[in-house]
Amino acid sequence: MRFNEQSTVSHPAPLILETMIERMEEIVPFLPNVESIETRESKKLKNGQLRIVRHWQGKADSIPSALRPFLSKEALGWIDTALWTPPEYKVEWQQSALSPGIARLYECKGENYFEPNPDDPKNSSRIRILGNLDVHPDRLPGLPTFLGRTLAPQIEKFVIGMITPNLRDLAKGLQGYLDQKAKGGRKKK
């Protein structure tokens, strides 16, 4: 199932892009459903692209309380493998679950753009998050394939309904982080 989220941040695109590539860990306090982000690998490629692998850890309180007893901390974490193309303000990404058992149950990938806002390109950015989530409940042991296929679209819709607010939170987190840095910068002068 495809998803698409768009937001605006009142800071220039080069600053947004640099923050996402170089200092993503610093925006964690501004992301209500994220406990931590840890860069595991960062490699500059010959073609000017960057490959960055990060471990994201979600917060348990971001999950409905009825589901919490059934989910381990590992189940709330994921690996984000990203291929950044800075001249295009673009990142292609793929998420994978930490738990191999959970990783079998879904595929999630897409591309994001942290680009100049066409309405105010020097002072603001447009963030576009485009992705695809495919859920495979038929891979659950003991669940009949026909039932898994029947449930997949409903599960995808439910999960995307939970993901979409988190996507909006990324733009809000960037806005809050960069606003605070701008205020802190003025105080030092």
Image: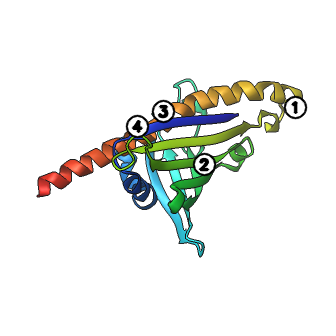
Q: CA distance from mark 2 to mark 4?
A: 22 Å
Callout 2 touching callout 3 (CB < 8 Å) = no
How many marks overall? Answer: 4
Determine crowd level at label 2: few under 14, some 14-19, many 20+ residues with C-alpha closer than 10 A.
Answer: some
Type of amino acid under label 1: Thr
- Towards the viewer: 122 or 1: 122
Residue located beneath label 1 in the image: 145
Pointer 4 local density, CA inside 10 Å: few below 14, some 14–19, many at least 20: some
SS under mark 3: helix
Image quarter in which the C terminus is found: bottom left
- 168 lies left or right of 152: left
3D distance between C-alphas at marks 4 and 1: 36 Å
Residue at the disc numbered 3:
62
**Which residue, given by chain and number where applicable, does mark 4 sit on?**
32
Label pair 3/4, CB-CB below 8 angstroms: yes
- Tell me the number on the disc at residue 93: none
Q: Residue at x 69, y 43 (%)?
A: 102
Of the numbered discs 2 and 3, the one sitting upstream in the chain is: 3
